[in-house]
Image (cartoon, helix red, strand yellow):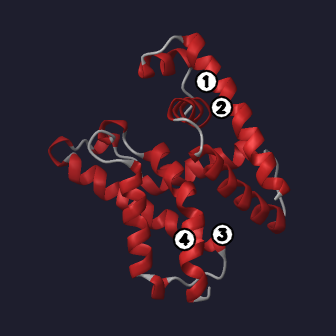
Amino acid sequence: MDPAEFGPALERCRSYLHLLARLNQNPRLRSKLDASDLVQQTMLQAHQALGQFRGRGEPELRAWLRQILARNLAHAERDFSRDKRDVAKERSIEVSLDDSSVRIDNWLIAQESSPSQKVEREELMARLADALAELPDAQQEAVVLHYWQDWTVAAIAEHLGRSPAAVAGSLKRGLQQLRGKLQEREKS
């Protein structure tokens, strides 16, 4: 990838990384470390290691950034829970990121695809992450918890301190807005 294209390509991946960070960050750490901080650290490290990137396009860039983000998530988990480490509960952050990426893939398309379809799906995932970032916080939280983390409406309601009917409404409005935003992006 041409160094002049690297910065803009990184920026196009920001929402995607933020979504992955949110999906994989330990909920106990959210009050101590925001997903945006993890993404910013990942972007900084990517800029510093520009010479190590061997890919040619954005799909390879996203994979490389996922690896950097996985290390940052693992380091954050380690740094904030050193005294409470339980080896039996450990799970590879890279596996978790891959699982989230797979969940996003499955949400977008449920069939085996050709290489060109995979590239198209990667681009759609990036557009989805951008559209998700534009939703109001309550809708964004409800959609992420329900569709990517498989929480029930009742569990989300308890977590957000809202009624199940309010959460269901947020989910409905969130999905409608996501569909609209994705259709707008598709046209442009």
User: Which disc, if any, is residue 170?
Assistant: 1
Q: Quadrant of the C terminus?
A: bottom right
Which residue carries the number 2 mark?
174
Looking at the image, tell me whether mark 4 or mark 2 is earlier in sequence order: 4
**Circle 3 SS class:** helix
Q: Which mark is residue 59?
A: 3
**Residue 5: x percent and y percent?**
61, 82
Which mark is nearer the camera, 3 or 1?
Answer: 1
* Percent of width and height locating residue 45: 38, 73
Asked if residue 129 lies left or right of residue 94, the reply is right
Residue occupying image coordinates x 52% and y 57% = 17
Using the numbered discs, state the Cα–Cα distance from disc 4 to disc 3 in whole angstroms. Answer: 11 Å
Give the residue type that dot 4 points to: Leu
Look at the numbered disc 4 and give the secondary structure of its residue.
helix
Q: Which tag is nearer the camera, tag 3 or tag 2?
A: 2
Residue in the image at 43% along x and 59% along y: 39
- Determine crowd level at label 3: few under 14, some 14-19, many 20+ residues with C-alpha closer than 10 A: some
Please tell me which of labels 1 and 4 falls first in the chain: 4
In this view, the residue in front, 128 or 68, is: 128
Check contact, mark 1 vs mark 2: CB within 8 A.
yes
Tell me which corner region of the image, top left, top right, bottom left or bottom right, holds residue 31. Answer: top left
Q: Secondary structure at mark 1?
A: helix
Q: Is residue 125 above or below residue 134?
A: below
Q: Is residue 117 left or right of residue 32?
A: right
